Image (cartoon, rainbow, N blue to C red):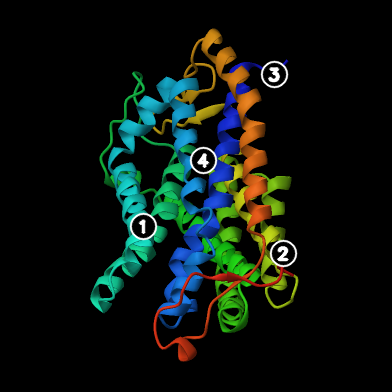
Amino acid sequence: MLHLHTLWFIVLAILWIGFFVLEGFDFGVGMLHTLVGRDEPERELVISTIGPWWDGNEVWLIVAGAGTFAAFPQWYATMFSALYLPLLIVLLALMARGVGLEFTTKRQDARWRARWRWAVTIGSLLVPLLLGVALGDLLHGLPIDSSHEYTGDFLGLLTGYGIWTGLTLVGLSLLHGATFLKLRTTGHVRERARVLGRPIGWAAIGLVAGFIVWTRTVGGPDVPDPVQVLSLLAVIGAVALTSTDHDGFAFAASGLAVAACVGTIFIDLYPNVMVSSTNTAYNLTVSNAASGGYALKVMTIVTVVLLPLVLLYQGWSFYVFRERVRGPAAARTGGDAPAAEPQGQPG
């Protein structure tokens, strides 16, 4: 029989996976927009590809945090206390990125735009990096005492495995963003996304391979499980498909690679939710960190009702905005491009 605390561990894993898959291409586009776009009209075109979704995709992170608080209050308390400073930086990065996306075009001044472009780029880099470090630390282990309190300092959060996990998610977000731009744009922007996708993809393959090996060392020195094998096959497939016109398949493969890498952390973590490097007896688990049965029952009922509606809305929004976007060439306009226009459907 599946216990409710185990069910909620699975739900939270799905929320984290959903966040990185959906927001991952937003982060990738944010990091790539000044490389793929060579002038202001092209950069606005690149940003317009994520316009319908970037703020909505962030909700998955908010729900994951709120779900952790409600379903596993002890996990929430220990994790957010230990990771207070990194999570504060994540919050500031999300704010800077969001403001940058909205404020860049509010003035014609070149320095004004350059500052906000950097805010978008750096914010899009820091969020997957720091959240990846945090997720890696959950599995690697942090110094937690018998009272489930973190006893280390900030430098103690910078574990080698956590940093590698963060870099892996940054690499996958870049690849996911490149395949998304190839799917959503035309002309020179699409071609630059294709060209950048190759070196980014090879770097992502190396990062994922290293992540799998290191995860096996941390989680147990045995052969990779099917999800880890799937993550490597998916990233290889995404790289191979970037050179073809199968843009939809390339985007799906990069998304699958993100999902598999995030998912493997939670698979290896269970039944723990946070590992203590001080003593395994101090580990937080799905049973000793969970809320009471009544709270979990109420949450489960609400989730069963609302989650399908959220998924339907998310799918509908992707269907409505499924067409490619284009903007007038900078040489023709001589200035800023107006709002991007749809053109054709992705291949």
For marks 2 and 1, the one nearer the N-term is 1
Residue 182 placed where, x, y %? 63, 72
Quick one: label 2, few (<14), some, or many (20+) residues within 10 Å?
Answer: some
For marks 3 and 1, the one nearer the N-term is 3
* Residue position marked by numbered label 2 in the rendering: 248
Residue 172 placed where, x, y %? 55, 60
Q: CA distance from mark 2 to mark 3?
A: 36 Å
Quick one: label 3, few (<14), some, or many (20+) residues within 10 Å?
Answer: few
Amino acid type shown at disc 1 = Arg
Q: CA distance from mark 4 to mark 3?
A: 24 Å
Closer to the camera, 251 or 259?
A: 251
* Residue position marked by numbered label 1 in the rendering: 97
For marks 2 and 3, the one nearer the N-term is 3
Quick one: label 1, few (<14), some, or many (20+) residues within 10 Å?
Answer: many
CB under 8 Å between callouts 2 and 3? no
Q: Does any portion of residue 15 appear in the rendered image? A: yes
Residue 341 placed where, x, y %? 58, 71
**Image quadrant where residue 222 sits:** top right
Residue 70 against residue 226 in the figure, above or below: above
Q: CA distance from mark 3 to mark 1?
A: 40 Å
Q: In the structure shown, which secondary structural element does the residue marked by tag 2 occupy? A: helix
> Which disc number belongs to residue 2?
3
Amino acid type shown at disc 3 = Leu
* Residue position marked by numbered label 4 in the rendering: 60
